[in-house]
Amino acid sequence: MIRISTIFIAICMVLVAASLGLVLYSVAGISGTESAIVALTALTFLILYNAVSMRLRDRSDVGGQIADLSRGTADLARQVAEFGRRLAAVEGRIASSNSTGADRMQGMAGEISELGGLVRQLAASVAHHEDLLAAAPAMQPVTSPRDDVLQRVAPAPTVVVAPQPTPAAPPEVSRSQTQLIGAIKQAIDENRIDIFLQPMVTLPQRKVRFYEAVTRLRDERDQLIVAEEFISIAEASGLIGRIDNMVMLRCVQVLRRLMIRSKDVGVFCNVSAATLSSPAHFTQCLDFLEANRALAPSLVLEFKQSTFRNLGPAETENLAALAQRGFRFSIDHVTDLRIEPRELADRGVRFIKVPATLLLDPRQASTSDIHPSDLSDLLGRFGIDLIAERIEGERAVVDLLDYDVRFGQGFLFAPPRPLRPEGPSATAGAPQTNPQDLNGASTSAPVSSPAAPPRATGSAALARRALGPN
């Protein structure tokens, strides 16, 4: 196509030069030689002009091609840089996966070593119990058919053994509502409110992370009244506010003593719905908590599930006032798994305690909005930790680990332990604490260190199961 255009331009230039010479020869009367010279001169100028214009046009085309080449080179450089970045990201992921695998292996090795320690503790506890049984056969008579036959053949001498008192299990006394109200008032006036601490442990490591303060009252005969007996009556008679104030004071004292040993410990303090809705009692609690605002990250206020479901405007405002001061909330007495985690998280709830039997109940999968095995992950997305309570068997722990439950509470790990009050009025059945545990307050620290009870108690429970009821 280019050659045809060039030939066409050359023909046109020759025609133009010949026409110019012909016009000069025929019209202007110039001789043929002069006309030919003029025509050749015109043709030369036309050729020069065409060459110069073609050179300029070629230069502009080359410049455009060079610019296109530069843009292509820049795009290629960007693509190379992007591939390099992706390659670096892939290498980083591979390195992180390798390190994560190593961390998991280390964690599994640590758990295996802890399980080995628990087995050794269990073996030592079983051996100790066997030694005790072998050393004192007369103190533990066994009534079996073989013993009856031996007694008939050769009667053994009679051994009189004094019955041992069992202060930990006082006899049950039936009380009327009037007597129970009187006992509650007298216990409040005479400061006979005891705090029992039950640990909450991490799973599967079983390290103590929190304590729950369980309230007990003592009557004039030092018989314990459990919370299930007096809470409802105290709420109906308007005495629960005073009890909550005294329990909150004890919880703060215990928490300060625990934090001397370890900063990573917390105390769950139960608060009733009546205290939350009573302006006078809640004002006292709020003033006290405001004075101890520095303990807000470690003091968790616990409410019932029914309390959160029946919140009124006043209760909602009081909860918001506590949340503004940095206090976190927990929910217990959960009866079903119809839970709205977003709403609870907005109100300051950071823990939910669900009974292990409720989590492991297969009927809950059909009655609730979410499968129990996915509940821990769902709550974790909103910053809420799931605590499985009332754990009484090792099989339940294994099943709960499949549900990704991080915390556990129950008699398997440790029962609620009483705090021995100062002075000679200490309860006879309360365990003795070490002198370094006392810190000059109305209550003493827990019996053992925060990290020791779950493992020792769990091993002792296993030993008791292995040895039988005796």
Image (cartoon, rainbow, N blue to C red):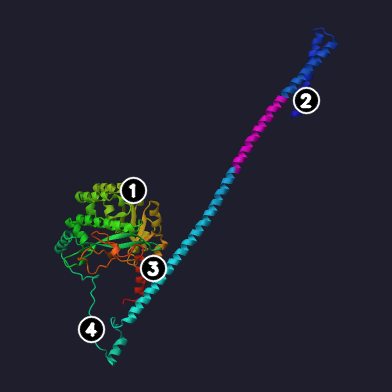
Residue in the foreground of this view, choosing between 62 and 198: 198
Task: Name the image quarter holding residue 38.
Answer: top right
* C-alpha gap between disc 2 and disc 3: 100 Å
Task: Look at the image and give the residue range highlighted in magenta.
Answer: 55-80
Vertical relation: 130 (above or below) 15 = below
Amino acid type of disc 4? Val
**Residue under circle 3?**
395
Q: Residues within 10 Å of mark 1 (few under 14, many from 20)?
A: few
Amino acid type of disc 3? Arg
C-beta proximity under 8 Å, tags 4 and 3: no
Vertical relation: 22 (above or below) 433 = above
Amino acid type of disc 1? Asp
**Residue under circle 2?**
7
* C-alpha gap between disc 3 and disc 1: 35 Å
Disc 4 element: loop
Give me the disc on residue 346.
Answer: 1
Q: Of the residues tagged 2 and 3, which is closer to the observer?
A: 3
Residue 181: % across, % down: 16, 61
One can see residue 458 in this view = yes
Left or right: 288 as drawn, with respect to 356: left
Q: Of the residues tagged 4 and 3, which is closer to the observer?
A: 4
Disc 3 element: helix
Is residue 459 inside the magenta stretch? no
Q: Residues within 10 Å of mark 4 (few under 14, many from 20)?
A: few
**Residue under circle 4?**
160
Task: Name the image quarter holding residue 74.
Answer: top right
